[in-house]
Amino acid sequence: MKGKIINIQKYSLHDGPGIRTTIFFKGCPLKCWWCHNPESISLNDEIMFREEKCTSCGRCIKRCKEAAIKLKDKTIIIDLKKCTHCGRCADFCINEAIEHVGKEIHLNELMIEIKKDMPFYEESGGGVTFSGGEPLMQGDFLNEALKRCKDLRINTTLDTCGYYDWEKIEKIHNKVDLFLYDLKLFDDKKHIKYTGVSNKLILDNLKKLSDLGKNIYVRMPIIKGINDDSEHIDACVKFLSKLHILQVNLLPYHKLGMNKYDKLSKEYKLTGGETPSDNKMKYLAEKFIKVGIKVKVGG
């Protein structure tokens, strides 16, 4: 069995308890305007070009079988319509200016990497976090990886947007020790505008997980001018106060992924100035604290 990932991050400290290995899956059903991992949205392989590293040596041009790469005004131009994302250009780029994003990995290969870090899990109370993208888009691969982790008594965390058929979640929930569950916008029209999908399925699935008594941290990105208003936060507080939630993480917007969009030939729809103030984050956190919800600002 094979899955498609973009990265295996070792010694991760912000994706669940203890020291963790975070597996970033490729593919996501949402297209959030502020996504800091745009290379994880498409399930297809992609080419990321870092012009600042390119020396125009021409090695990639010679290796491209599709003639999709040209040199114009001493700058490499990649024709994405011709590109088949075979990755040959990246293999022969000595300056690492071209990156092939998307790696097929066999389940056995993934488990070898996970097992290497088991001493860290045992000492710190850590484990493995499946993130993305959206891992549920590769549900069968995720299910088998979770099963093997549980067979080894490894703590498991699933970072999910929750936008998937309940049958998929029902199949894996008993193998997940902690859910990191995204809640981006409570107003459905705004949710559709800024993520491309309705939030009805997301809210329904969150309630079902809560009814099952699962361990859930709700993660809420806070973006100035989009979802930092009291109306949105008050609606979330009212909804979450009725559920079994261990903690709410309020995540202030950052623009760390902004420069990736140009390298992927994608449009970034925000300005980069949407970070809320510290006072605003404190004010929003107080709303959850007042109703007895444990809250943390940051990861």
Image: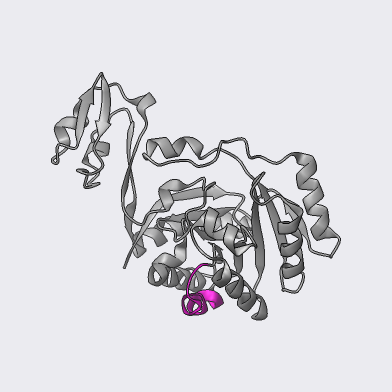
Q: Does the magenta stretch include residue 172?
A: yes
Q: Is residue 115 above or below residue 67?
A: below
Residue lying at 51% horizontally and 72% vertically, measured from the top left: 150
Quadrant (top left, top right, bottom left, bottom right) of the N terminus = bottom left
Q: Is residue 146 above or below residue 278?
A: below
Q: Can residue 113 be seen by looking at this rendering?
A: yes
Q: Is residue 203 left or right of residue 4?
A: right
Q: What stretch is highlighted in magenta?
A: 163-174
Residue lying at 39% horizontally and 66% vertically, measured from the top left: 138
Residue 46 rendering spot, x and y as whole percentages: 32, 46
State the image quarter where residue 290 is shown: bottom right
State the image quarter where residue 189 is shown: bottom right
Residue 84 rendering spot, x and y as whole percentages: 21, 47
Query: What colour scheme was applied to this rendering of the protein?
Result: one colour
Q: Of residues 239 and 86, which is closer to you in this image?
A: 239
Q: Of residues 180 and 32, which is closer to you in this image?
A: 32
Residue lying at 70% horizontally and 49% vertically, measured from the top left: 228
Q: Residue furthest right?
A: 290
Q: In this view, does 11 lie to the left or right of 226?
A: left
- Total labels drawn: 0
Magenta span: predominant SS is helix
Residue 221 rendering spot, x and y as whole percentages: 63, 51
Q: Is residue 53 magenta?
A: no
Q: Of residues 106 and 187, which is closer to you in this image?
A: 187
Residue lying at 29% horizontally and 21% vertically, measured from the top left: 55
Q: Can residue 127 be seen by looking at this rendering?
A: no
Residue 193 rendering spot, x and y as whole percentages: 53, 55
